[in-house]
């Protein structure tokens, strides 16, 4: 309550100054504005600190009850109930199956922005002997989406309590199936967008975060421009001709041809694409043949292509077809390739990053903002960034002194739960700061 009174007093100081604006008074106004900003940031810190126990309890609840992609029924129900309790203006459910969108309209006019958390877990066994270990056999929140969802609910609570002073609207997106929909199903960010999540109202910008165990708790990692890779999947089938293993010249050996293809495909990386452009072409599955003394007539190769540039991504696909056509025809074989485009390049809008960094530095402390190299992992947040400018940053959750170092997607993955408080405080400030900067009646 005390801080509210202080804010009102500071707001009236600013109003008086604005009414009497004159030469030389700019600096006084900006100092009054920065006092208001710092009072607001302090209030958010107090609220986030006071929520610590509840944030941890919420994260543990999600961690105990993890749900696979497109099966986030319980998680979505908990989220929707919470948003209704917080008296959100609108709570939309069942978007892209279990997606939830909450709309929070502030008391002052302004822009619309969005914040996104993902809700799904992974088919990984829980190996941690902790009180909040997964009770869903074979499923674990091993990518920290339990943290993302809890942080976004924490932000929802803080901002809903401040709604009268918020200049604009915030769209809270809770997304299913970030890890990829099960075979034969659609899902994730692409389906959310298809079902209109970025319309009515359309956000001017979108923010998101991901936990990162190789960043210590208390720090945040970020970079401008390409931050994470595009991620595509391919399935190549090499067709040959089956024959007795003793008479290979009478058939076409799909195994030998496939081996040539594997080697030739790597020359796309080493010889055909600009060497300064990051590119990964990995084959993870080779399958073919059915007996030691029979020449195989078919070999399947499955793999992934990762790039940080959409032009490179398109070129690689064309080069793969060219290479496969050349190599297979040289041996009288043939091929088919199924190429499925997955997540796009996660591209942090440089202008949005630049204008957001000051508030992040204030909240985290300059030395806790860590610049990172782009990663070749992928994230379907990229789909939103293709429609509106977005900023996706990494929340430090590691703690070497406590032994919390296991990477995401491993059975040993865990987080330092202090990151919940930090994540909530930071994202609340990032969102409010954007809206204040873009307020119509500044
Ligand atoms: Zn993941
Ligand atoms: Zn993830």
Image: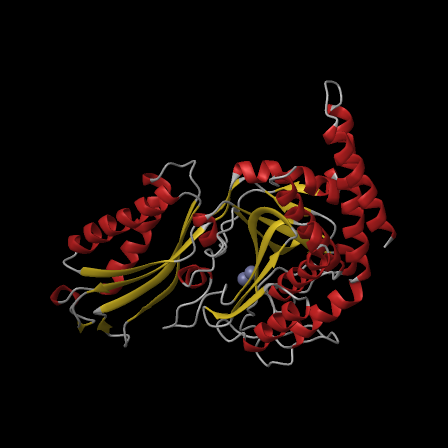
Residue at the left extreme? 250
Q: Position of residue 274 (x, y in %)?
A: 37, 36
Q: Left or right of 227: which side holds 256?
A: left
> Taking the image as four quarters, which one is ligand 2 found in?
bottom right
Name the quadrant containing residue 118: bottom right
Q: Which quadrant would residue 258 be assigned to in this image?
A: bottom left
Depth check: give the residue in front, 391 or 325. Answer: 391
Q: Is residue 184 left or right of residue 324?
A: right
Q: Is residue 267 left or right of residue 180?
A: left
Do we see residue 109 in this rendering?
yes
- Looking at the picture, does residue 50 appear above or below residue 375? below
76 relative position to 229: left or right:
right
Q: Nearer the viewer, residue 280 or 326?
A: 280
Residue 362 location (% of width, % of height) = 74, 40
Task: Name the residue at the top extreme.
Answer: 23
Task: Name the foreground residue: 322 vs 298.
Answer: 322
| Residue depicted at 59% across the width and 73% down the height | 75
The residue that appears at 38% across and 44% down in the rendered structure is 310
Q: Position of residue 376 (x, y in %)?
A: 49, 50
- Please say if 77 is above or below 2: below
The structure's colour scheme is secondary structure
* Image x and y of residue 266, in percent: 35, 48
Farthest residue in the right direction?
Answer: 2
Q: Nearer the viewer, residue 380 or 137?
A: 380
Instruction: Quadrant for the C terminus, please.
Output: top right
Q: Is residue 423 visible?
A: no
Q: Residue at 51%, 76% (x, y): give it.
A: 71
Q: How many marks?
A: 0
Task: Answer with the quarter of the image where residue 23 lies.
Answer: top right
Instruction: Say which quadrant the N terminus sits in.
Output: bottom right
């Amino acid at each position: 309550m005390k801080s509210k009174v202080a804010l009102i007093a500071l707001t009236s100081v600013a109003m008086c100054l604005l009414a009497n604006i004159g030469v030389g008074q700019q600096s006084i106004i900006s100092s009054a504005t920065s006092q208001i900003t710092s009072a607001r940031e302090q209030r958010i810190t107090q609220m986030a600190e006071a929520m610590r126990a509840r944030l941890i309890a919420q994260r543990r609840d999600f961690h105990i009850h993890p749900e696979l992609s497109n099966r986030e029924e319980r998680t979505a129900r908990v989220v929707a109930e919470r948003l209704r309790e917080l008296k959100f203006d609108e709570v939309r459910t069942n978007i892209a199956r279990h997606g939830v969108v909450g709309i929070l309209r502030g008391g002052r006019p302004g822009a619309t922005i969005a914040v996104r958390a993902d809700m799904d877990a992974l088919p990984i066994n829980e190996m941690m002997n902790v009180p909040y270990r997964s009770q869903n056999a074979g499923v674990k929140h091993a990518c920290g989406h339990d943290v993302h969802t809890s942080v976004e609910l924490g932000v929802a609570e803080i901002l809903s309590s401040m709604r009268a002073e918020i200049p604009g609207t915030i769209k809270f997106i809770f997304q299913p199936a970030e890890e990829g929909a099960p075979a034969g199903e659609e899902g994730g960010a692409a389906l959310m967008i298809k079902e209109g999540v970025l319309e009515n109202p359309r956000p001017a910008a979108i923010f998101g975060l991901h936990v990162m165990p190789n960043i210590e708790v208390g720090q945040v990692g970020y970079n401008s421009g390409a931050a994470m890779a595009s991620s595509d999947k391919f399935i190549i089938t090499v067709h040959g001709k089956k024959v007795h293993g003793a008479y290979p010249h009478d058939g076409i050996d799909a195994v030998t041809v496939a081996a040539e293809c594997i080697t030739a495909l790597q020359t796309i990386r080493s010889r055909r694409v600009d060497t300064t452009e990051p590119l990964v072409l990995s084959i993870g599955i080779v399958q073919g043949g059915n007996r030691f003394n029979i020449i195989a007539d078919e070999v399947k190769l499955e793999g992934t292509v990762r790039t940080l540039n959409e032009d490179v991504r398109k070129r690689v696909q064309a080069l793969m077809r060219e290479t496969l056509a050349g190599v297979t025809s040289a041996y009288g074989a043939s091929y088919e390739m199924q190429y499925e485009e997955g997540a796009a390049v996660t591209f942090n809008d440089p202008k949005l990053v630049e204008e957001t960094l000051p508030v992040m530095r204030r909240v985290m402390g300059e030395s806790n903002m860590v610049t990172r190299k782009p990663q070749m992992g992928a994230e379907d947040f990229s789909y939103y960034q293709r429609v509106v400018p977005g900023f996706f940053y990494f929340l430090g959750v590691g703690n070497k002194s406590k032994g919390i170092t296991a990477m995401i997607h491993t059975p040993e993955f865990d987080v330092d739960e202090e990151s919940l408080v930090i994540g909530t405080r930071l994202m609340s400030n990032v969102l409010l700061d954007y809206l204040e900067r873009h307020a119509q009646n500044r």
